[in-house]
Amino acid sequence: DKVGVIGVPSCKGQSAGGVQHGPKALRQAGIIDKLTQLGVEVYDYGDLVFEQFDDDTPILGLKNPKNIGLAAKKISDQVSRVIKDDQIALTLGGDHSLSIGTIHGHAAAEKNMCLVWVDAHADINTPLTSPSGNVHGMALSFLVKELKEYIPQIPHFEWIKPCISAKDIAYIGLRDLDPGELWIVRNMGISCFTMHEVDRYGIDMVLRMSMQAINPHGDRPIHLSFDVDSLDPRISAATGTPVPGGLSVREGIYIAEELAATGKLTAVDLVEVNPLLGTKEERDLTVYAATEIARACFGKKREGNIPPGYVLP
Ligand SMILES: N[C@@H](CC/C=C/[B-](O)(O)O)C(=O)O
Ligand SMILES: [Mn+2]
Ligand SMILES: [Mn+2]
Ligand SMILES: [Mn+2]
């Protein structure tokens, strides 16, 4: 496999300072080497640089429209280029608003892609339903075709073409939805496996049902958007919006192992690591969990791995 790593030091989609240092924290934890050790051909594109615009007043309550709209375009172009170069795009965040760009870029390169969104949150508030104006909680609303009529015109967001249908999305790990989001999930027919379903069916069955729903013939490129706050705060406390009762690191790794096994994983977002939050132990554990999810996405197996060409001595 060839993997293109893109750092996205974004933070304006939410209000906790520090998430822009997520890419650096993951790099300092050796994420690149850990992938290289798996025999993966890693192309590191470094971190995207975003021009900062201070004159960026909220529109309809949506915060930082100019900074986020312009950043998303850069992200979209970069992800699209990486995938067209036959590399799996691994985007290190940064806040979850970056997924506007990664999913848009993925769809530009692979229009038949489908999406697994692993998160405590649905991130599908529209600008009119958002309780906070934070775009990391709205990312999907600009991308889902069936929501087009509910999305007001936002300056610097005009270039975003809705590129995915509700039926092509599966949520895993949800446990903190706003009313508007639940209405959308229920009425647009998005496959949704909250922590209730994870408890009821177990993670394997949830994954099987997700794939049955969005990729029944196993022929569609898969986009995994992994928000570290999907994991339980006991193992992922260094994040802006922690919610108790999350996935265990084993469940997170299982999702990654199974999606890797399909051979169709084409883009991965690893977002919302905020190294300035929590104690040093909590930060190190959060970063460790995130790097283990990444390793599992690119072939690391708990049964072990045999290097190519290995011969028993
Ligand atoms: N639903 C809340 C929380 C959003 C959380 C976004 B996150 O999942 O990317 O952390 C909001 O809209 O403000
Ligand atoms: Mn979240
Ligand atoms: Mn999120
Ligand atoms: Mn988060």
Image (spheres, grey):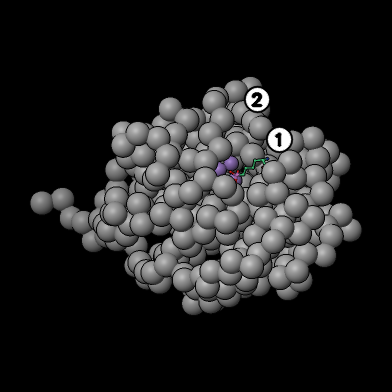
Q: Is residue 82 left or right of residue 53?
A: left
Q: Is residue 282 left or right of residue 240?
A: left
**Disc 1 to disc 2, C-alpha distance:** 13 Å
Examine the image and state in which quarter residue 45 appears.
bottom left
Residue 117 or residue 88, whichever sits in front: 117
Task: Give the vertical position of 210 relative to 54 (above or below).
Answer: above
Image-quarter location of ligand 4:
top right
- Residue 140 coordinates in the image, percent (x, y): 70, 53
Could you tell me which residue is drawn at 41 percent across and 54 percent down?
Answer: 21
Which residue bears the numbered disc 1? Answer: 177
Q: Is residue 116 left or right of residue 273?
A: right
Residue 274 or residue 168, whichever sits in front: 274
Could you tell me which residue is drawn at 46 percent across and 55 percent down?
Answer: 20
Residue 242 or residue 197, whichever sits in front: 242
Residue type for callout 2: His
Quadrant location of the N terminus in the rendered image: bottom left
Beta carbon of the mark 1 residue lies under 8 A of ligand 1: yes
Could you tell me which residue is drawn at 57 percent across and 56 percent down?
Answer: 12
Task: Return the mark for residue 196.
Answer: 2
Q: Residue furthest front?
A: 55
**Are the residues flagged by discs 1 and 2 in contact, CB closer than 8 Å?**
no
